[in-house]
Image: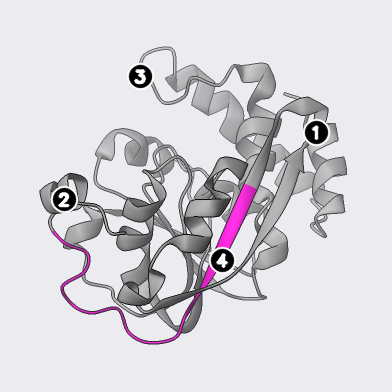
Amino acid sequence: MDLAQLATETTKLGVELSADQIAAFQAFGEALYERNKVMNLTRIPKEECWSKHFLDSLLICPLLGEAWSIVDVGTGPGFPAWPLACARPDLRVTALDGSNKGLAFLKEHPLPNFEVVQCRAEEWDRREVFDASTGRALAPLAIQLEVCAPWVKVGGLVLPFRTPGDQVSAESFPAEVLGLGYEDGVYAQLPEGAGERFFPFYLKFEKTPKRYPRKWSEIRAKPLG
């Protein structure tokens, strides 16, 4: 893992990593791939972890305000939640997932501003309390927005990790049914041709109707839009 290059690239995002933070990323990465030998937590090769896990998770930093509360829905082994909490100690980050597979690993790597919650998103009860919600590799966009919108307070943002191919659907999605309005989209490029991200961002202008999110079977059978 090239953590020197990670530090160089995060500086471009306005995030300066200290020696202690770099050491924490190193320890987390080593532990992740050690656990991956006995439990499938990631398919990304170890040598690409710094860019495709750590840096990718931090591409969203310029869109996040100071001291925001963030929930990462469907966090898996902690991406983007753990890198965000490590690199941005001003944030309060909650990692939410219905499976304990990745969360058990995450609980072994606590941070002062990091919370781990096991609960299915459609069964959670912490509505309208976060400044922003996000998620990476979670589900098709319509499903991701439905399970991310309810937890954000009015005036907050839903900021899903997507790919450039999602721009048209992001702009045309009827987000108002969730109390959201599409504001804009931002592209971010990983170095060395490692990939490109598209971050559509939606402003929460009113509370999400309590009927959302629906039961998972309904969400999957009939996505919104």
Mark 2 vs mark 1, CA separation in Å: 36 Å
Residue matched to label 1: 191
Residue sitting at x 80%, y 48%:
10
Residue matched to label 2: 216
Q: Quick one: label 4 or label 2, which is nearer the N terminus? A: 4
- How many numbered marks have been drawn onto this rendered protein structure? 4
The disc label shown at residue 39, or none: 3
Q: Residue 125: percent from the left, percent from the top? A: 21, 71
Q: Quick one: label 3 or label 2, which is nearer the N terminus? A: 3
Residue sitting at x 26%, y 39%:
100
Q: Would you say residue 160 is visible in this rendering?
A: no
Q: Residue 209: percent from the left, percent from the top? A: 23, 79
- Quarter of the picture containing the C terminus is bottom left
Q: Quick one: label 1 or label 4, which is nearer the N terminus? A: 1
Amino acid bearing label 4: Phe
Mark 1 or 3: in front is 1
Farthest top residue in view? 37
Do callouts 4 and 2 mark residues in contact (Cβ within 8 Å)?
no
Q: What element carries label 1?
A: helix
- Indicate whether 169 appears above or below 151: above
The color scheme shown is: one colour
Q: Is residue 202 magenta?
A: yes
